[in-house]
Image (spheres, rainbow, N blue to C red):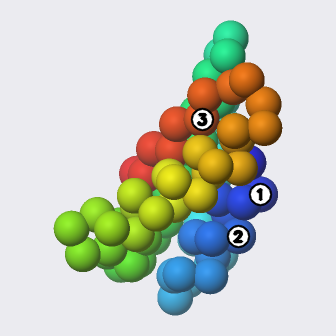
């Protein structure tokens, strides 16, 4: 999941070196914290949060094979 979020975020931003994804696993929950450069924040969130919602939807669909819940937190 970490690689998927990283790939999507790097393809959206102007500064791909500024993309950092941190993965935390607790019980049956995986939390992915996505951090990007401040000037790229709007590109990752999108107008009205549409891109952020799309990223979460793709990750949720990819995680549906397992029994783990995945949370994507954009910072």
- Residue in front for this viewpoint, 36 or 53: 53
Residue at label 2?
7
Percent from the top left, x then y, of residue 58?
59, 58
- Disc 3 or disc 2, which is closer to the eye? 3
- Dot 1 alpha-carbon crowd within 10 angstroms: few under 14, some 14 to 19, many 20 or more: few
14 displayed left or right of 17: left
Labels 1 & 2 near each other (Cβ < 8 A): yes
Count of marks overlaid on the render: 3
User: Which residue is rendered at x = 43% and y = 52% of the image?
Assistant: 74
Residue at label 3?
70
Residue at label 1?
3
User: Which residue is rendered at x = 68% and y = 11% of the image?
Assistant: 27
Q: Residue furthest left?
A: 48
In the rendered image, the vertical position of residue 41 relative to residue 2, given as above or below: below
The answer to whether residue 41 is visible is: no
38 displayed left or right of 3: left
In the rendered image, the vertical position of residue 5 relative to residue 63, given as above or below: below
Labels 1 & 3 near each other (Cβ < 8 A): no
Cα distance between the residues tagged 1 and 2 = 6 Å
Percent from the top left, x then y, of residue 16?
62, 79
13 displayed left or right of 4: left
User: Which residue is rendered at x = 51% and y = 82% of the image?
Assistant: 13
Cα distance between the residues tagged 3 and 2 = 17 Å
In the rendered image, the vertical position of residue 31 relative to residue 42, given as above or below: above
Callout 2: helix, strand or loop? helix
- Residue in front for this viewpoint, 54 or 32: 54
């Amino acid at each position: 999941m970490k690689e998927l979020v990283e790939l999507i975020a790097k393809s959206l931003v102007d500064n791909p070196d500024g993309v950092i994804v941190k993965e935390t696993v607790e019980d049956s929950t995986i939390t992915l914290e996505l951090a990007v450069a401040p000037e790229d924040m709007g590109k990752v969130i999108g107008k009205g949060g549409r891109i952020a919602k799309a990223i979460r939807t793709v990750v949720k669909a990819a995680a549906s094979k397992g029994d783990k819940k995945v949370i994507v937190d954009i910072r």
